[in-house]
Image (cartoon, helix red, strand yellow):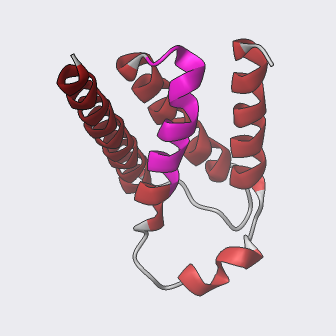
Amino acid sequence: MSKPYKILVVSFLVGIYASIPFVPYLKFLHGQPDYWHYAIYAVLYLLLFPIFDCNLINTYLLTCSFGISDELIQFVTPGRFFELKDILRDAQGATMGMLIVCAILKYINSINLKKK
């Protein structure tokens, strides 16, 4: 699957998730802090990273744009709410994903240097 199609698939999935008025499988999170934003957007970053030929910045910008579009869709979806703090949490999750990738790349680099 080529890069544009992969991005369209991810965009479609984010759009579907954002437009569901109530997400039943996340019922256990109601009333809990919204820490799951961090995990979801860290994983999204990790999934998008290979699509962008391992470009840290472009992957980060796209992941953050998904967070913004997610909140904009929720703004017009009954039962869902736009919150600026969720956009910030999404960006922090993307940052966590980027830090994980950087740590993995550093580890791989150190192994390659030891082999030489």
Task: Please tell me which residue is depicted at 66% across the width and 82% down the height of the picture.
Answer: 27
> In the orientation shown, which residue stands out farthest toward the front?
115
The residue stretch that appears in magenta: 40-54
Q: Is residue 106 left or right of residue 17?
A: left
**Residue 72, percent across and down?**
59, 42
Task: Please tell me which residue is depicted at 43% across the width and 24% down the height of the picture.
Answer: 61
Task: Please tell me which residue is depicted at 37% across the width and 53% down the height of the picture.
Answer: 89
**Residue 47, percent across and down?**
57, 37
The quarter of the rendered structure image containing the C terminus is: top left
Task: Please tell me which residue is depicted at 67% across the width and 44% down the height of the picture.
Answer: 73
Residue 5 seen anywhere in this rendered image of the structure: yes
Q: Is residue 62 magenta?
A: no
Front residue of this view, candidates 9 and 70? 9
Q: In this view, does 40 lie to the left or right of 98?
A: right
Residue 67 seen anywhere in this rendered image of the structure: no
Picture layout, residue 96 above or below residue 102? below
Front residue of this view, candidates 7 and 54? 54
Picture layout, residue 74 above or below residue 34? above
Figure disc tally: 0
Q: In this view, does 102 lie to the left or right of 44?
A: left
